[in-house]
Amino acid sequence: MAQNRRRPKILFLSKKNSENALCDMNLLIEGLLSLEVDLIVPKESVKDIEEIKPQKKRATIIGQTPESIADMVLIVGEMESKNKIQTLIKQGAVPVLSSSHAAEMELIAFNPVEEKGVSFIFNETYHWDIFTAIVRALETYNFPYDWKNIVTGCKTD
């Protein structure tokens, strides 16, 4: 199995609302920081995120990078402008988002058996559900054929 050698870049977009009240953001961020990823966050959030100390930090936090280099876009809570998200997807950032956001944007969850779909969806806005969707996306990232097909689907949908 050939694997992507470059660390995936995850753009983390999060806005508080009633939908993510169940989500312990500190636990979610701690989980993200324990992964072998580059985490792209808004410049104003870097300091807050760096204060969270996971047991074993593997992630790199990036604060001033063009969003267009993201491999994935993680949307938690209230969605940014729909146009912005659609632009990121068209640029090849695979969305990881709630089922309600996916329905709103008419995105289909990736199904590895059928090799269809362009997103990774979590059903509840609970940190473990979100983390599970991220892990599914990261595992798929390690299969270049599947990942390329998802990204191609993002760019053409």
Image (cartoon, rainbow, N blue to C red):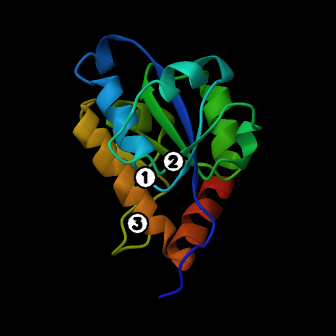
Mark 2 surroundings within 10 Å by alpha-carbon count, few (fewer than 14), some (14 through 19), many (20 or more): some
Badge 2 marks a residue whose secondary structure is: loop
Which residue lies under the disc numbered 3? 139
Hey, which quadrant is residue 128 in on the image?
top left
Hey, which quadrant is residue 99 in on the image?
top left
**Drawn side of residue 74 relative to residue 26, left or right:** right
Q: Position of residue 54 (x, y in %)?
A: 36, 38
Badge 1 marks a residue whose secondary structure is: loop
Q: Residue 65 has which mark? A: none
Question: Do the residues bearing badges 2 and 1 touch, measured as CB atoms within 8 Å?
Answer: yes
Residue lying at 22% horizontally and 21% vertically, measured from the top left: 22
Q: How far is the residue under mark 2 from the one under mark 1?
A: 6 Å
Task: Say if 129 sits above or below 101 in the image.
Answer: below
Q: Position of residue 29 (x, y in %)?
A: 40, 33
Which residue lies under the disc numbered 1? 35
Which residue lies under the disc numbered 2? 59
**Drawn side of residue 132 relative to residue 79, left or right:** left
Q: Is residue 146 visible?
A: yes
Mark 3 surroundings within 10 Å by alpha-carbon count, few (fewer than 14), some (14 through 19), many (20 or more): few
Earlier-in-chain disc, 3 versus 2: 2
Residue lying at 49% horizontally and 38% vertically, measured from the top left: 74
